[in-house]
Each structure stands twice: as C-alpha cells, then as structure tokens.
Image (spheres, grey):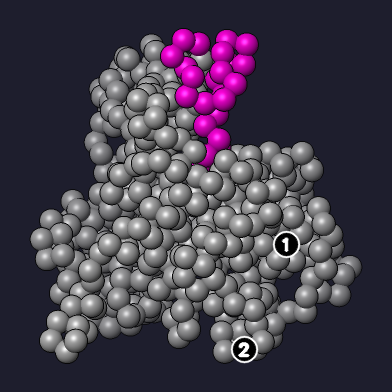
Amino acid sequence: MTDPYERLRAEAEAGRVEEVVVAVPDLQGRLMGSRLSVPYFLEEAARGGFGACVYLLATDVEMDTGPGYAIDAWDSGFGDFVLRPDPATLRTVLPWDEGTALVLADAVWPVGPGGGHGPGHGPEHGPEPVAVAPRHVLRTQLDRLAARGLTAYAGTELEFLLFTASYREAWERRYTGLRPAARYNTDYSLQGLEDVEPVARRIRRAMTRAGLRMETARGECHPGQYEIVFRYDEAMATCDNHVLFKDGAKRIAAAEGASLTFMPKFDEGEGNSCHVHLSLRGTDGTPVLADPSAGDGMSELMRHFIAGQLACLPDLALLMAPNVNSYKRLQPGAFAPTGIAWGRDNRTCPIRVVGSGPSLRIEHRVPGGDANPYLAVAAAVAAGLYGIDNRLPLPPEHTANALADPAVPRLPATLTEALHRWEGSGIAAELFGKETVAHYAQAARAELSAFERAVTDWERVRGFERL
C-alpha cells in the first residue's frame, strides 16, 4: 500500500512545502491547530498524533470556555487531547499560504498515564474519539448509515458578502458603514460585479488548485453578495472542503485588502445561506432515493427520509442554526424558511426536493453561512434515519407559499427556543447521546449569555434620547 504521505515528502524534498498545518474543526467549524515542520510531522505527528489543548472543542466564538461543556477544561487542568491526522484530507497545495500543506485531524483521548480526560482510557482500549468533536459527530451518523448499507453524498452552497474595506479597517469601524463590493442586486447578473470579480476570481482559482471542484459561481441578491458552488462528494469530504473553503476565502479577501463575511444576517438585506444538498446511495454506489415505477418518482426510503426531516426539524434546529444571528435570517420576509414543510422545487419550504432519477435529492434550506457543516449534515442524516427506522409517513407536499401559510408549523424562531427544544428532546438524546446534547446545549447557552450582556446599536438608537 502506498504511503499517503509520500507525496508530501516529495514536495518537501523539492522545496515546495516547508510546513504542515495540523487542524481540527472546532464547534463553530473553524480550523484550529498548529504549524509543524515537515520532518517533525512525517517522523512523529503523522503516526502518533500531535497534542492540543482540550478547550479547543469547548469554547465560544471568543475562545472563552467554562463549566457546563462535556469537556471541562478548567477541571482537567487544561490538558491535551491528541490530534490524529486523517491522511485522506492532506492538501500539499494551499494557494493562499505558500509553502504550506494542511491536514485535518480527529481529536482522540490520549492512552496511558496522563490520558484520563475521557471515559474508558488505557492501553487495552486504544485511543478513544472525543465524542463531541464535530467530525466525530458526523462520522457516527455516517457509520449508522453504513450499517444499513447506505452512504451519504452532500453538497453545500455557501454565500458571502464582500466589502471593499480590509478586515483591520472593518474592525476599527466596528463593522459599521462598510461599502459592499457591488452597488445593487446582482442576482445572476453579469454586470455590476467589477469590484467583486478580482477577489471572487482569485478565490475560484485558488480553490480549484487546492483540489475543490467548482461547479458554478454568480452574484446574489444582496449588494456585494456572491455564491460559489462546488461539486458534491461523499458527505465527510464535502464538509472538509467546506471548512477549507471558508478559511481560504477569508485569507484571500484579506490579501486583496478586502473583507468578506459568511454571517447569516449582516443587516436588514438578504442573508447568507448554506443550503445543504443530500442524497443517499447504496455502498455499491447505486442511488436509492429514486423509484421510476412510483408515481412521484420517489422510493419508499426517500419518503421516509423526508418525513424524518420534518419530524426532527424543531428538535435538531440548533445543529443547523447555532447562533443568535442565525435566527435573524429565519424570519418572515427574509426569503429563508420559517415553517416546517416540504415541496418539489419549492424554495419557500425548508425541505426542497430537486432533481430526478439518479440526481434526485433533498435541499435543506435551514442552515445559514454560520452553520458548522459537520453538525448540519449530521442532523440531516440522523433525521432521515429516524424517519427510515420508524417508517414515518410522508405528509402531502406543499405546493404554495409556505412562508405565508399560517397552517404550516413553525420552526424555532430564536436560539432560546431552539435550545429548549434540543435540550429537552428525547429524539436528540436518542440520535446523538446525552453527552453531545449537553455539550452543544452549553455552547448555545454561552452564545445567549454573551448576547444578553451586550448593549447593541439598536438599543442606543432606540433609547439614548427617547427613553
């Protein structure tokens, strides 16, 4: 069997790679890790892993940690877990970081003396995964699929807003008064993008060089908004590509003296979505969602799969919309889902059925640009399996405007509501385990606590003089 790191060794010997970034996706889907020299990586870290502080998987956006997470960094003395590189994720070319390779890693608990941070450790057990790590949360659901002879394929459609100010300037201005890189709605437009294209083109070319397969790119509704769609892949690979894209796009924008944001709702205009396309195949690669003999073209398995999405959406919304800002996008009039329904090619529904035959799939429209892809896809897979295992019947499709129909059941409207549904859900505990439920409930509480302490510009404008 060929050593997966021989290519890295060859690139280093040719002088094209000097360092290797070993990174783990955190709770927010950001890449956290360290730079290693190539010799040290190849001689030690590639096989034995590399230590990193346990708090990396128990923090909020500001990197604050505390009690309540399944990983209590203070109680464990801020010890280490081990980042075990996944050779399938190795990139020897990062166009935005010359001379650097990158490999994603899975977090596992150390074995032997000093390895007591997690349950069941010791030489007889081997390295045990950190159960709440986003990659492991997804892998657990994909393993459940595999046990049924199924494989998930996914594609994520990320949108971002591009601004002409640098990140430094935007920070110093507290992100107010920024000029979008387009003056008006450029949805599908081929003009009005003269300030967008230099950055967007560099992003597209860099991602292609990094191994992502681009399908389409275009302007979107909000001035300065842009969408790049990459080819679907096996679900884990898609999520790995997703976090690489977000990291690289921000670095490229910074190098161009610009800034971009994936936040779901930057202002009162259109928000940034992250629609997730999901299909299932047998382990032999055969599509299983379509049935040409059925009147609706859908297999019985697909009908149960969609029914599971609808049944689980309220309880699992937290994994798709994890922040206060997520729910500013999921509001009436924002062209984002607010109810629980499904429809064929109906963009007012959170579950949109698209394609036909082998390309038949669902498009999950709840996640925004802030979604952690591993958790969002894990939630969709788990919900589908819940529908399959319980043989849930599929309700009639919604053929009209689901956003305006008062009869359509509502999604959680706030992070507080989503947290209560998640934390009190027997379905969530069944599908993800009590430890994972508690860990991500604490992440939501940390987000809410920070928001509730903040005094916003809206409050100052509303109350400074008139209250």
Q: Where is residue 359 in the image (x, y as percent from the top left)?
A: 68, 62
Pick whichever of labels 2 and 1 is earlier in the sequence.
1
Majority secondary structure of magenta residues: loop
Mark 1 = which residue? 308
Task: Determine the secondary structure under disc 1.
Answer: helix
According to the picture, the residue beneath numbered tag 2 turns out to be 406
Label 1 neighbourhood size at 10 Å, few (<14), some (14-19), many (20+)?
A: many
Label placed on residue 100: none
Which quadrant does the N terminus fall into?
A: top right
Task: Name the residue nearer the viewer: 147 or 186.
Answer: 147
Q: Is residue 173 left or right of residue 76?
A: left
Closer-to-camera residue (144/426): 426
Q: Residues under labels 2 and 1: Cα distance?
A: 22 Å
The location of residue 23, given as percent across then percent down, is 38, 34
Name the secondary structure under disc 2.
Answer: loop
Quick check: is 105 in the magenta stretch?
no
Where residue 421 appears, as percent x and y from the top left, is 58, 62
Taking the spot 82% from the left edge, 57% from the top edge, the residue there is 390
Q: Is residue 127 magenta?
A: yes
Residue 233, percent across and down? 57, 49
Q: Is residue 445 visible?
A: yes
Closest to the observer: 156 or 341?
341
Looking at the image, is 188 positioned above or below residue 278? below
Q: Give above or below for 224 relative to 11.
A: below
Magenta range: 112-137
Q: What residue type is labelled 1?
A: Gly
Occupied quadrant, residue 436: top right
